[in-house]
Image (spheres, helix red, strand yellow):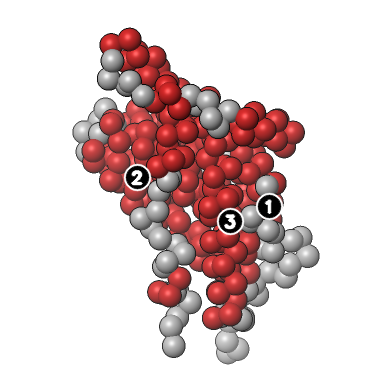
């Protein structure tokens, strides 16, 4: 029998190679000011159904597994993914920083939506995009997050032409500034440790270790906030085993 810690049959749903889809990447580059909102909307639409299916399968395979145990399993998987991508981006230097920030924010979104599903909250509901922006501290309040999401949805077709002509002298400077705004917005979404990680890329070799630590740490912090949000207050905690009697 497969042990819950292995869970090989679920790797298709927790594909560690997953990254933001190309269409999303283009939208974020074209509209960097609302990059977190574009990412949150895409995550709910694309990852929400995957998260719901994963939890359904886990409950079928392991009907006696406590929700807290399943939540920690999801945290462990996505933390491992974040640590790996952080180390890889640290080894390639500054050019990989923006791509890694996007991948980290995407991984964090996957984690939040899986945790929502674990605790019985619909991961496909539009409100989950609002949750993502508040949990990742892009916005302090739900109303501000909803407003920004509405603006982003209205701007999805804006700026596509800006992604063209990147190599021309006339557009090179504006595109550079746009990428700078994009990196800042993604760093804000992924966590402020990610900003320090980008700065650490100037230090040879240290960026590899720091990148892995920073990514893992941001996942832990976000997981704690998400569990506090989604875990039902009345849910009985996992009992600790009693020591054997003498």
Q: Residue at x 60, y 76 (%)?
A: 59
Pointer 1: what residue?
A: 125
Q: Quarter of the image containing the N terminus?
A: bottom left
Marks 2 and 1 in Cβ contact (< 8 Å): no
* Number of other residues with Cα within 10 Å of mark 2, as a class: few under 14, some 14 to 19, many 20 or more: many
Q: Secondary structure at mark 1?
A: loop
Mark 3 touching mark 1, by CB under 8 A? yes
Name the residue: 54% across, 81% down.
61
Of the 4 image quadrants, the one containing the C terminus is bottom right
Viewer-nearest residue: 241 or 208: 208
Quadrant of residue 94 in the image?
Answer: top left
Residue shown at the point (42%, 46%) measured from the top left: 21
Between the residue at mark 3 and the residue at mark 1, the CA separation in whole angstroms equals 8 Å
Looking at the image, is 13 positioned above or below residue 86? Answer: below
Residue where numbered disc 3 is placed:
48
Residue 231 visible in the snapshot: no
| Label 3 secondary element | helix
The disc, 2 or 1, on the residue closer to the chain's N-terminal end is 2
**Camera-side residue of 70 and 8:** 8
Looking at the image, residue 140 sits to the left or right of residue 16; the answer is right
Does 210 appear above or below 61? above
Q: Earlier in the sequence, mark 3 or mark 1?
A: 3
Q: Nearer the viewer, residue 98 or 232?
A: 98
Q: Which mark is residue 86?
A: 2
- Given the current orientation, which residue lies at the most extreme top position? 170
Decide: few, some or many residues near mark 1? Use Cα within 10 Å; few <14, some 14-19, many ≥20.
few
C-alpha separation, residue under disc 3 versus residue under disc 2: 24 Å
Q: Tell me which numbered mark, 3 or 2, is placed earlier along the sequence.
A: 3
């Amino acid at each position: 029998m497969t042990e819950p810690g292995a869970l090989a049959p679920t790797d298709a749903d927790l594909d560690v190679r997953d990254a933001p889809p190309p269409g999303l990447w283009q939208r974020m580059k074209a509209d960097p000011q609302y990059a977190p909102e574009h990412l949150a909307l895409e995550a709910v639409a694309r990852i929400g159904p995957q998260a719901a299916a994963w939890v359904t399968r886990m409950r079928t395979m392991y009907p006696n597994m406590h929700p807290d145990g399943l939540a920690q399993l999801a945290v462990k998987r996505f933390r491992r993914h974040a640590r790996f991508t952080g180390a890889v981006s640290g080894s390639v230097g500054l050019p990989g920083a923006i791509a890694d920030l996007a991948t980290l924010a995407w991984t964090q979104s996957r984690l939040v939506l899986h945790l929502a599903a674990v605790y019985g909250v619909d991961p496909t509901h539009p409100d989950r995009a609002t949750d993502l922006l508040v949990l990742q501290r892009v916005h302090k309040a739900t109303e501000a997050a909803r407003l920004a999401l509405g603006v982003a949805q209205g701007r999805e077709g804006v700026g596509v032409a800006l992604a063209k002509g990147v190599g021309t002298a006339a557009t090179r400077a504006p595109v550079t500034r746009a990428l700078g705004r994009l990196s800042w917005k993604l760093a804000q979404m992924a966590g402020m440790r990610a900003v320090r990680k980008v700065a650490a890329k100037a230090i040879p070799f240290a960026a590899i270790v720091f990148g892995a630590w920073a990514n893992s740490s941001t996942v832990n912090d976000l997981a704690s906030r998400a569990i506090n949000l989604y875990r039902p207050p009345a849910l009985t905690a996992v009992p600790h085993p009693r020591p054997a009697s003498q």
